[in-house]
Amino acid sequence: MIHSLKVGRANVFVIQEEKTIIVNTGSPKKSDFLLQSLYKLGVTKNSVSLILLTHGHLDHFGNINEIRSVFNAPVAIHREDVGALEKGQDSYLKPTRKRGALIKPFLHGKIKGTSPDMLIDTTLSLKPFGVNGKVVHTPGHTDGSLSVILKNKEMIIGDLLMGGHIGGFFLPHKPRHHYFAHNMDTAQKSIQRLLHEKPSKIYVGHGGPLTFRDIQKREF
């Protein structure tokens, strides 16, 4: 089961099966809110097997230090995005359209950098972490973007797509390209590779969740 929590500007996901995996930690300075939300879901120190970061942007790893210290679980990120985590700030933001260029000057921020416990290159089975699924490399938004595919075909795809407008505030279930992407052609290929799996539900970092049918209608 996937639970979605809006933490600051971005969504945090909690996968609960035999064990619990926390996917991303939201915008900085929201750790108290996130912890209380996790406790309400029954997440305990002993239940968390992994903290997975879908990519190296601050609104998705902003509370990593606090969450890691509480749950003492290993942190995983793709090798290509580890530099952002170690510096505690965004990797390069390349706007895909005018709105991205307009908001980019307001997105600067920084936290205390940290190193991950695990570096992912291509795929990672989640079975050793108590979840029936896998992590796959889906570059485009960033070079090291990752997605989660569960056995029931539910997916968490980070910022490969987004839902709605103004960070998902309006029309959150309407699929859209994100405001930023390192390489749009690569992002398109990653999207198509995931759609080939015929996902049952798609969770994104902003807005959502999205459906396979709605994404097909937009002809991504």
Image: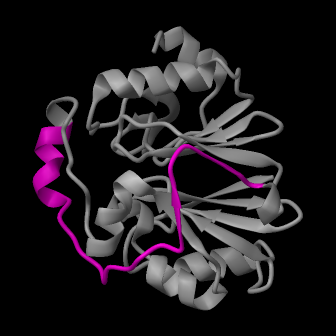
Q: In which quarter of the image is residue 212?
A: top right
Quarter holding the C terminus? top left
The spot of residue 129 in percent (x, y) is 77, 64
The spot of residue 195 in percent (x, y) is 61, 21
Vertical arrangement, residue 45 with respect to residue 146, above or below: below
The spot of residue 21 in percent (x, y) is 70, 64
Residue at the right extreme, as displayed: 18
Q: Residue at x 86, y 60 (%)?
A: 17
User: Looking at the image, what colour scheme do you see?
Assistant: one colour
Vertical arrangement, residue 37 with respect to residue 18, above or below: below
Instruction: Report the side of 168 relative to 42 (left or right).
Output: left
Instruction: Report the side of 33 relative to 48 (left or right).
Output: left
Q: How many dots with numbers?
A: 0
Vertical arrangement, residue 214 with respect to residue 20, above or below: above
Q: Which one is in front, 140 or 108?
A: 140
Question: Would residue 57 be seen by someone viewing this image from the given angle?
Answer: yes
The spot of residue 108 in percent (x, y) is 17, 64
Q: Quadrant of residue 33?
A: bottom right
Question: Would residue 88 be seen by someone viewing this image from the given angle?
Answer: no
Residue 125 is inside the magenta segment: yes
* Residue bounds of the magenta highlight: 100-126
Residue 86 is inside the magenta segment: no
Q: Which residue is drawn at 35% across and 36% down?
A: 178
Instruction: Report the side of 188 relative to 1 (left or right).
Output: left
Q: Which residue is drawn at 64% across and 17% down?
A: 196
Q: Residue at x 79, y 84 (%)?
A: 46
Instruction: Report the side of 143 relative to 2 (left or right).
Output: left
Residue at the bottom extreme, as displayed: 69
